[in-house]
Image (tube, rainbow, N blue to C red):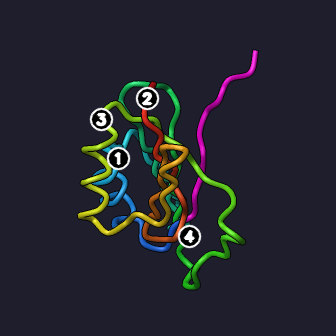
Amino acid sequence: MITFNHYNVNVLNLERSIRFYNEALGLTVQSEKVAEDGSFRLVFLTDGVTSFRMELTWLKDRTQPYNLGDEEFHLAFHVDDYEALHEKHEKMGCIAFENPSMGIYFITDPDGYWIEIVPAK
């Protein structure tokens, strides 16, 4: 049997990303791994409900933004209170694209990664 474990994104400012994912999506830090030489930190976020985790990777020597291509890949979350979360994301100014005909929208994190928001059905 094969099951999902985690999804990784590399970030330039780890603390800023942790704050964003907590504020925008309610994710919290589950665990952390720090390299002995300080060259990287891995922080695993959880939704507190499923076993799926999101890994934020910070590399000490990285100073340039990551090339995200055409932003065609993304992570998706389904949410119970779609309208309330949409309003929150509007106030945060992080909505990147809306598709009302499909009933979805996308937000971007501080590094430009796209996250799809889907209403639970």
Q: Dot 4, how many residues are within 10 Å of its Cα: few (below 14), some (14-19), or many (20+)? A: some
Residue 104 at x, y percent in the picture: 49, 47
Residue type pointed to by label 3: Asp
119 lies left or right of 54: left
Q: Report the magenta residues as a range.
A: 1-10
Residue 71 at x, y percent in the picture: 65, 66
- Labels 1 and 4 touching (C-beta < 8 A): no
Disc number for residue 120: 2
Residue type pointed to by label 1: Leu
Find disc 1 in the rendering and name its residue.
25
Residue located farthest toward the right when viewing the structure as drawn: 1
Residue located farthest toward the front when viewing the structure as drawn: 101
Find disc 4 in the rendering and name its residue.
59
Q: Dot 3, how many residues are within 10 Å of its Cα: few (below 14), some (14-19), or many (20+)? A: few
Q: Which residue is pictured at 52% across the width and 70% down the height? A: 112
* Quarter of the rendering occupied by the N terminus: top right
Q: Which residue is pictured at 50% across the width and 60% down the height? A: 41
Q: Which residue is pictured at 34% across the width and 30% down the height? A: 80
Find disc 3 in the rendering and name its residue.
81
Queried whether the magenta region covers residue 72, the answer comes back as: no
Residue 10 at x, y percent in the picture: 57, 63
